[in-house]
Image (cartoon, rainbow, N blue to C red):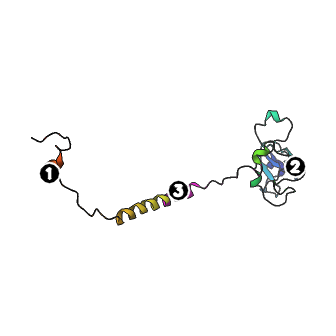
């Protein structure tokens, strides 16, 4: 059976400290292990963006989450869904409750189903109209001399 020192040296396995990010996997000896070659970072050091805005300075780089997407319960300010003392996002006027709503895009299977139903209803309606519209009551009129070709300015028949 492998020891902890051998597990640590095998493939960059590291023992997780409880104040750092936790792992869901258990090692062979019941010790929480993480497959990683990077150093453990505390929870408060998480980066939200790869490219921080250089003009924001030391203002926190908060994630782009609209207020409408947050849960409506447990906030100090229920309308804007934020707690007292919480930093306001740099673009709060875009992410607040008074902006456009979040549009939940349907899946492609649902879109295809809706278009199929629409086209079938349209085609079915066209078929029903063509089936029930009666034919002309009178027959078309026949004129002599090839439909009065000479009288309408056509080339005379010789």
Q: Quadrant of residue 58?
A: top right
**Residue at 27% in and 64% down:** 137
Residue 114 spot, x, y in % from top left: 53, 59
Front: mark 1 or 2: 1
State how far apart marks 1 and 2 are (Cα).
93 Å
Left or right of 85 in this view: 38: left
On residue 86, the disc is 2
Q: Residue 112 got which mark?
A: 3
Residue 32 lies, in percent from the top left, at: 82, 54
Q: Residues within 10 Å of mark 1 (few under 14, many from 20)?
A: few
The tag earlier along the polypeptide, 1 or 3, is: 3
Residue 54 in the image: above or below residue 35: above
Proximity of marks 1 and 3: CB atoms separated by less than 8 Å:
no
In the rendered image, the quadrant that contains the N terminus is bottom right
In the image, residue 12 above or below residue 134: above
Tell me the element at label 3: helix
Question: What residue span does the magenta drawing correspond to?
Answer: 96-117
Horizontal arrangement in the rendering, residue 115 relative to residue 36 (left or right):
left
Alpha-carbon distance for marks 3 and 2? 43 Å
Q: Earlier in the sequence, mark 3 or mark 2?
A: 2
What residue is disc 1 on?
144
Q: Give the total of numbered labels.
A: 3
């Amino acid at each position: 059976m492998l020891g902890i020192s051998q597990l640590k040296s095998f493939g960059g396995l590291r023992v997780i400290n409880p104040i750092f990010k936790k792992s869901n996997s258990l090692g062979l000896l019941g010790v929480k292990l993480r497959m990683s070659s990077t150093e453990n970072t505390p929870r408060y050091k998480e980066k939200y963006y790869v490219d921080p805005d250089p003009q924001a300075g030391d203002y926190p780089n908060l994630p782009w989450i609209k207020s409408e997407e947050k849960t409506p319960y447990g906030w100090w300010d229920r309308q804007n869904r934020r707690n007292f003392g919480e930093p306001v996002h740099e673009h709060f006027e875009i992410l607040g409750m008074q902006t456009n709503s979040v549009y939940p895009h349907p899946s492609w299977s649902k879109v295809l189903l809706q278009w199929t139903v629409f086209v079938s209803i349209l085609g079915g309606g066209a078929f029903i109209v063509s089936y029930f519209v009666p034919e002309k009551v009178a027959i078309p009129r026949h004129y002599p001399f090839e439909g009065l070709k000479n009288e309408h300015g056509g080339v005379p028949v010789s």
